[in-house]
């Protein structure tokens, strides 16, 4: 019997193509019969949970995370990693995800590096919460590699005449990607190898006049600093700011989720 809450069925896709975009960014295009169960949404930060089963565990069919977490011990639950859907082509039956790969550490990056055509890709979702508001006077897009797919999708969604400022941190110039947009967009690339700092770059940015709709995501350190800056110093209201730490330096995904949950609980207790 499934646990409480909405069913969380898992879609079974197959790897169709693979492309090395940059030295550390791998693109996986997936599809197959299982993509018929996928229903895309209107968000430019549409995301899926990529599922990595524990080897040797027999999971109940059909795969459903609600059933798995209700019926199996914690050590047998699959690991999950959250990724933005870079492209979804309903006509072609293809879904594209870009994976950051930094060697053999981690889970999703090594999987993408070793993936071959025909391999299974399991995912749940999509979720999402942000798309550029066409009523905004201008758009601020800030992030690192983890947010780059969502930033790229947002830039592609902006119409001609829209004003945008983007600040993106990557390792070095080899990790930069072409970013297509019809908007009047200024993109500043930052490089870790040069010691560039995201929060400093945003503070140095000349803000155009008018209502800004902002998207700020990536490593939790600069996200926290920019949350304070945008809310307290720039007067951006919470409803005009999509902001969240996607990851934290030195933490794996499970550790970071637990830390975020604890921080959220502490904030709620402090304001209760």
Image: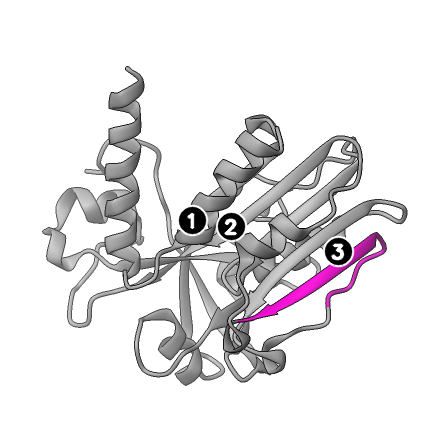
Camera-side residue: 243 or 121?
243
Marker count (numbered): 3
Say which mark, if any, is on residue 245: 1
* Residue 133 can be seen, yes or no: yes
Q: Which residue is pictured at 32% across the width and 82% down the height?
A: 104
The span picked out in magenta is 179-191
Q: CA distance from mark 2 to mark 3?
A: 18 Å
Of discs 3 and 1, which sits in the foreground? Answer: 1
- In this orientation, does residue 95 appear? no
Dot 2 and dot 3 residues touching (CB under 8 Å): no
- Magenta region, mostly helix, strand or loop? strand
In screen coordinates, is 206 left or right of 9? right
Magenta-span inclusion, residue 211:
no
Labels 1 and 2: the sequence-earlier one: 2
- Judging by the rendered image, the residue that carries numbered circle 2 is 217
Q: Secondary structure at mark 2?
A: strand
Classed neighbour count for the residue bearing mark 3: other residues with Cα under 10 Å, few (<14), some (14–19), many (≥20): some
Q: Which residue is mark 3?
A: 156
Residue 249 quadrant: bottom left
Q: Are marks 1 and 2 in contact (CB under 8 Å)?
A: yes
């Amino acid at each position: 019997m499934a646990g409480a809450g909405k069913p969380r069925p898992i879609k079974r896709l197959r790897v169709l193509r693979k492309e090395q975009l940059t030295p550390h960014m791998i693109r996986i295009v997936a599809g197959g019969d299982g993509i018929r169960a996928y229903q895309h949404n209107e968000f430019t930060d549409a995301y899926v949970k990529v599922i990595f089963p524990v080897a040797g565990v027999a999971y109940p069919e059909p795969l459903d995370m609600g059933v798995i977490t209700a019926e199996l011990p914690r050590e047998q639950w699959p690991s999950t990693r959250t990724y933005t859907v870079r492209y979804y082509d309903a006509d072609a039956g293809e879904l594209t995800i870009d994976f950051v790969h930094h060697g053999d550490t981690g889970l999703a990056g090594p999987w993408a590096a070793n993936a071959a055509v025909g391999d299974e890709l399991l995912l749940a979702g999509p979720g999402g919460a942000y798309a550029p508001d066409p009523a905004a006077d201008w758009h601020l897009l800030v992030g690192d590699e983890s947010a780059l797919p969502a930033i790229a999708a947002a830039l592609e969604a902006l119409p001609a005449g829209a004003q945008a400022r983007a600040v993106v941190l990557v390792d070095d110039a080899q990790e930069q990607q072409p970013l297509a947009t019809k908007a009047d967009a200024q993109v500043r690339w930052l490089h870790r190898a040069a010691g560039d700092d995201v929060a400093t770059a945003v503070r140095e940015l000349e803000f155009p006049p008018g209502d800004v709709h902002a998207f700020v995501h990536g490593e939790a350190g600069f996200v926290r600093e920019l949350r304070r800056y945008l809310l307290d110093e720039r007067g951006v209201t919470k409803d005009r700011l999509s902001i969240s730490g996607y990851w934290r330096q030195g933490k794996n995904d499970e550790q970071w989720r637990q830390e975020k949950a604890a921080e959220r609980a502490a904030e709620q207790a402090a304001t209760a």
